[in-house]
Amino acid sequence: MSMKKKLGSEMMNALSVAMQSGSILLREGLEALLVIAALAAFLNRAGVPAKVATLYVGAGFAVLASIGAAVVFEMFFGGNHNDYMEAAILAVAAILMLYMSGWMYLRQDPRTWVKELRGHAERALNSGTAFSLGAIAFLAVFREGGETVLFLHALATSSGGWGIDLIAGLVAAALCIAAIYYAMQKLAMMLPLRPVFLVTSAFLFIMGLRFVGAAFQELQERTVVSYTPATLPEWVVSLGLNPSWEAIGAQLVFAAIAVASTLALRLRRPSSAVAAE
């Protein structure tokens, strides 16, 4: 009987470790996955699937950089991430996301996009835009990558090493992430071109503003920026948004600048297009 109890206890411990490792990867990686999957769906639907490799390269470099950052955090910061570095990463990622959001919005017209693709598909996504896409993928993964490695390292240390249970949880989470990615790509190919552009643009716009709030939260944790609580609905707070007036004010400023600059460019496009013809 004691043998059965011991075996049952070991199985429960193994299941617990697997669930913990899987939840870490899902929790920390889901946001990055959504960003990369949305951008990949946009590129595939726009008819330039070759550019998707830029996202994979950016994400791959981010994984390597995350491992390096985790080693640095472990050796010099006692296993804690650096709030200032994360705030800087979030700010740069937010700016790039807002830029790409406007870029996609300006190219939502299928007739304009198809015309561009017929003549110069590669120039439609020039090297500067491709770099922005790769940088967004890099920052989306790197933002939480180092912390994820540290969490998994701590779990492995407390559970007796990188056992089959811990790895099984990671594999299961990776399969879930791959399934979500695959489903998003299939769905994007079934939708008309304009909705894919608009949805991806809106998603990046929201994520960019969310990253602005997250950057402020990192600085508020260091008391560099003050924190004045804002009364927000519970469902808004549950989405991970920063419930402070400082963050909300910064988000409104960023949103206003992004919307104003995008509208200004949109108003200039017809006249410039006529002049070009």
Image (spheres, grey):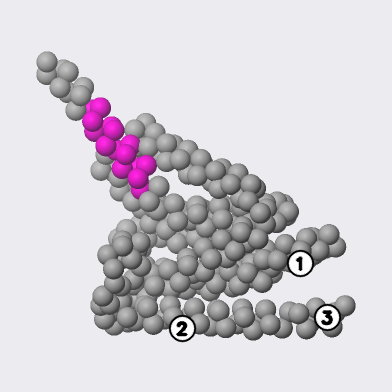
Q: Say which element carries label 1.
A: helix
**Mark seen at residue 274:** 3
Task: Please state which of the two labelled residues, at mark 2 or mark 3, is closer to the viewer.
Answer: 3
Question: Is residue 52 visible to the viewer in this orientation of the structure?
Answer: no
Q: Residue at x 66, y 72 (%)?
A: 106
Foreground residue, 151 or 263?
263
Rendered image quadrant of residue 272: bottom right
Task: Give the residue furthest to the left.
Answer: 2
For residue 253, the mark is: 2
The answer to whether residue 173 of the structure is visible from this angle is yes
Which residue shows up at 67% across the image and 57% down it?
A: 193
Residue 14 part of the magenta segment: yes
Label 3 Cα crowd, 10 Å radius (few <14 / some 14-19 / many 20+): few
* 84 relative to 150, above or below: below
Q: Position of residue 113 (x, y in %)?
A: 75, 63
In whole angstroms, how far apart are the C-alphas of marks 2 and 3? 33 Å
Q: Earlier in the sequence, mark 3 or mark 1?
A: 1
Q: Which residue is mark 1?
A: 112
Q: Position of residue 165 (x, y in %)?
A: 34, 33
The residues colored magenta run 10-24
Secondary structure state at the residue bearing disc 3: helix
Which mark sits nearer the N-terminus, 2 or 3? 2
Q: Tell me if residue 64 comes above or below residue 204 in the rendering.
A: above
Q: Residues within 10 Å of mark 1 (few under 14, many from 20)?
A: few
Q: Earlier in the sequence, mark 2 or mark 1?
A: 1
* Magenta: main secondary structure: helix
